[in-house]
Image: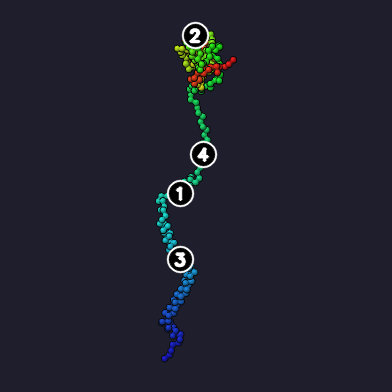
């Protein structure tokens, strides 16, 4: 019987069980190579288990933070408005100064209000003559008409009947009256609480209440209307009153 050559035997073997043996060896070689390659990479990266745990822990923390954050505004304001508000808060503009000139107050139309006049430091004599009876509020003096001792609130300036009586200073006539005791009387207000009083005048006077007078203006003439001083020679009874209190006229009348 003729035997087959060796190559034919090898071919038959490969066609039989030999094919599977070779296939197994190839798979084993690939598996072993992959194992060593994967082991080297695992050692260089520090271990697969630690990276996995860190990755999982980080993912859990991120999810916890996301769950605790405030939900966004469902209707956010437009970006332009937010920028304008932020600009207004952080960069306020200085208030502009009002450069409009203040309006000059206008005086009301009509009769201008009269400003109070300054009290004169000196007064002119209301009539030419000598002082017949002095001012006396602290010392009693004998009154020939009344026959008793009493005070005297003014000066009795001797003058002839009909002698002109003038205002001692500028002011306004406040009243023209006939007093039961002092006769026809004119009162002039000089401002600042100062008044002058002219008594024992004749019945006819040259002024009325409300008139404005200047120093030296004619008020009336010397008369005999003062019953309480009828026993005295012809004279003008003259008084100065400051804030309702009689004062000595000689302290204010011009001295020659």
Where is residue 49 drawn, in percent x and y? 44, 67
Q: Residues within 10 Å of mark 1 (few under 14, many from 20)?
A: few
Where is residue 60 drawn, in percent x and y? 42, 61
Nearest the viewer among 217 and 147 is: 147
Judged by depth in the image, the label closer to the viewer, 3 or 1, is: 3
The residue at the point 47 percent across, 46 percent down is 85
**Residue receiving disc 4:** 96
**Residue receiving disc 2:** 231
Q: Are marks 2 and 1 in contact (CB under 8 Å)?
A: no
Nearest the viewer among 169 and 90 is: 169
Distance from the alpha carbon under mark 3 to that under mark 4: 65 Å
- Above or below residue 40? Residue 108 is above
Judged by depth in the image, the label closer to the viewer, 3 or 4, is: 3
Q: Are marks 2 and 4 in contact (CB under 8 Å)?
A: no
Q: Which color scheme did the rendering employ for the protein?
A: rainbow
Distance from the alpha carbon under mark 2 to that under mark 1: 108 Å
């Amino acid at each position: 019987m003729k035997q087959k050559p060796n190559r034919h035997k090898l071919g038959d073997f490969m066609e039989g069980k030999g094919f599977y043996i070779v296939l197994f060896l190839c798979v084993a070689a690939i598996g072993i190579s992959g194992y060593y390659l994967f082991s080297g990479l695992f050692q260089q990266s520090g271990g697969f288990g630690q990276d996995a745990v860190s990755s999982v822990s980080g993912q859990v923390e991120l999810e916890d933070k996301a769950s605790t954050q405030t939900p966004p505004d469902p209707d956010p304001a437009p970006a332009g408005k937010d920028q304008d508000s932020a600009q207004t808060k952080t960069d306020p503009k200085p208030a502009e100064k009002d450069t409009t000139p203040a309006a000059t107050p206008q005086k009301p139309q009509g009769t201008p209000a009269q400003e109070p006049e300054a009290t004169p430091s000196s007064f002119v004599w209301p009539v030419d003559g000598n002082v017949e009876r002095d001012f006396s509020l602290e010392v009693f003096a004998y009154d020939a008409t009344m026959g008793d001792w009493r005070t005297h609130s003014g000066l009795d300036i001797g003058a002839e009947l009909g002698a002109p009586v003038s205002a001692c200073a500028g002011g306004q006539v406040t009243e023209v009256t006939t007093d039961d005791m002092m006769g026809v009387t004119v009162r002039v207000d000089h401002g600042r609480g100062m008044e002058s009083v002219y008594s024992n005048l004749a019945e006819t006077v040259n002024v009325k209440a409300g008139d404005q007078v200047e120093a030296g203006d004619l008020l009336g003439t010397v008369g005999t209307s003062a019953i309480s001083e009828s026993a005295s020679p012809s004279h003008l009874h003259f008084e100065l009153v400051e804030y309702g209190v009689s004062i000595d006229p000689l302290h204010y009348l011009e001295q020659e």
